[in-house]
């Protein structure tokens, strides 16, 4: 993947502010550009949740009516779902520019959305994963397969928090 990489995360009718907060954190860590979601359950639950009051993310969180509207023309749609016929994530080659769509915690992505997808992938676990965990696994897989040149020491120094000054001695 090149520097032209662009990643959006699409959440279909999420219900848990805790999960959405964890998705925002993952999006920031893995440099996704945007998180968008549909439905009314998350905003309704967020009003009564203390978990979201301190969400501080540099990644925009946008409510939309349709996850597929207003996407860049060259962005591919990748649904992440336990669906018959889906491709296992370990063998999947990520497009440079993609929106990854995830279903709700208690349901699936709408068939109409899956029918419009360029790709449908699944994480080959036993049972289904938590929404936020699925997003983290997908974004890590994308990072692990990317051909990035990283100055490891500088990367570690710039990414860790102020309480971590650990050095491997050797």
Image (cartoon, rainbow, N blue to C red):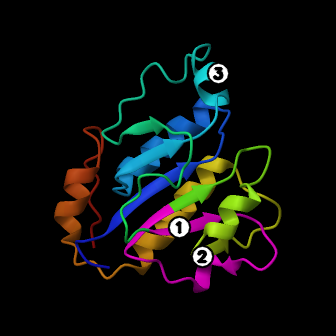
Instruction: Give the residue at x 59% y 32%.
Output: 18
Residue nearest the viewer, comparing 55 with 80: 80
Precedes in sequence: disc 3 or disc 1: 3
Mark 2 Cα shell of 10 Å, populated few (<14), some (14-19), many (≥20): some
Which SS class for mark 2?
strand
Tell me if label 3 and label 1 are in contact, CB under 8 Å.
no
Taking 46 as reference, is 170 left or right? left
**Magenta stretch encompasses residue 25:** no
Query: Mark 2 sits on what residue?
Result: 119
Range of residues picked out in magenta: 76-99
Question: Is residue 44 placed above or below 25 in the rendered structure?
Answer: above
The quarter of the rendered structure image containing the N terminus is bottom left
Query: Mark 1 sits on what residue?
Result: 77
Query: Mark 3 sits on what residue?
Result: 45
Residue nearest the viewer, comparing 167 with 69: 69
Q: Position of residue 45 (x, y in %)?
A: 64, 21
Instruction: Give the residue at x 68% y 33%.
Output: 15
Precedes in sequence: disc 1 or disc 2: 1
Tell me if label 1 and label 2 are in contact, CB under 8 Å.
yes
Instruction: Give the residue at x 68% y 52%.
Output: 103
Which SS class for mark 3?
helix
Q: Which mark is residue 60?
A: none
C-alpha gap between disc 1 and disc 2 = 7 Å
Question: Is residue 128 placed above or below 46 in the rendered structure?
Answer: below
């Amino acid at each position: 993947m090149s520097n032209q990489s662009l990643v959006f995360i699409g959440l279909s009718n999420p219900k848990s502010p805790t999960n959405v907060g964890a998705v925002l954190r993952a999006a920031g860590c893995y440099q996704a550009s945007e998180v968008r979601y549909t439905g009314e359950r998350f905003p309704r639950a967020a009003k009564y949740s203390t978990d979201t009051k301190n969400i501080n993310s540099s990644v925009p969180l946008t409510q939309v009516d349709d996850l597929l509207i207003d996407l860049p023309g060259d962005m591919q749609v990748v649904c992440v779902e336990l669906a018959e016929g889906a491709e296992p994530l370990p063998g999947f080659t990520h497009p440079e520019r993609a929106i990854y769509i995830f279903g709700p915690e208690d349901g699936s992505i709408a068939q109409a959305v899956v029918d419009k997808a360029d790709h449908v992938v699944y994480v080959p676990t036993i049972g289904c994963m938590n929404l936020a965990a699925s997003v983290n696994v997908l974004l890590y897989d994308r990072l692990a397969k990317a051909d990035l040149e990283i100055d490891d020491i500088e990367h570690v120094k710039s990414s860790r928090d102020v309480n971590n000054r650990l050095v491997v001695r050797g």
